[in-house]
Amino acid sequence: MSDARSGLSRILAELAEAGPQAEPVLIGAHRKAQGVLLSIEAYENLTRRAARREAVDSAAGSLAAEGLRPTPASDQDAEAYVRGTLSAEEMAARALARHRPETRQATG
């Protein structure tokens, strides 16, 4: 803990410089981790990912309540959305394309 106190300015500067790629810094007493320091970008990425996971889980719960199950392709899109590699708009467009009658007929 005293190392963290004495080096806090340096630690914060290193986190800021590394940005989202910064490794978390564990802090605690007696060599036991009790907390963690993250760059603000890493923290924001985690909170966005948690919010996307919550939205996906809520949607899955709504489907289950209606007695429906997502397709494997929908599950893959949902996981890409949680990771942040697919936007909500892209996910919705893919879902609509999969389930529109004219799209299914056109693709065979």
Image (cartoon, rainbow, N blue to C red):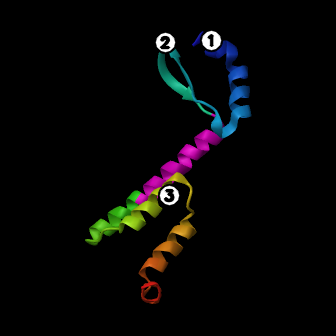
Q: What residue range appears in magenta?
A: 39-56
Residue located at (59% from left, 40% from top): 43
Which kind of residue does numbered mark 3 sit on?
Ala
Give the x, y percent position of residue 92.
51, 72
Q: Nearer the viewer, mark 1 or mark 3?
A: 3
Which kind of residue does numbered mark 1 sit on?
Asp
Label 2 to label 3: alpha-carbon separation: 37 Å
Disc 2 is placed on an element classified as loop
Q: Are marks 2 and 1 in contact (CB under 8 Å)?
A: no
Circle 3 residue: 80
Residue located at (41% from left, 67% from top): 73
Report the side of 27 relative to 108 (left or right).
Answer: right
Farthest residue, direction front:
108
Mark carried by residue 3: 1
Q: Residues within 10 Å of mark 1 (few under 14, many from 20)?
A: few
Residue 14 versus residue 90 in the image, above or below: above
Circle 2 residue: 31
Give the x, y percent position of residue 74.
41, 67
Q: Quadrant of residue 23?
A: top right
Which kind of residue does numbered mark 2 sit on?
Arg
Residue 94 versus residue 55 in the image, above or below: below
Disc 3 is placed on an element classified as helix
Give the x, y percent position of residue 38.
60, 33
Label 1 to label 3: alpha-carbon separation: 39 Å
Report the side of 15 relative to 81 (left or right).
Answer: right
Between discs 1 and 3, the one toward the N terminus: 1
Between discs 2 and 1, the one toward the N terminus: 1
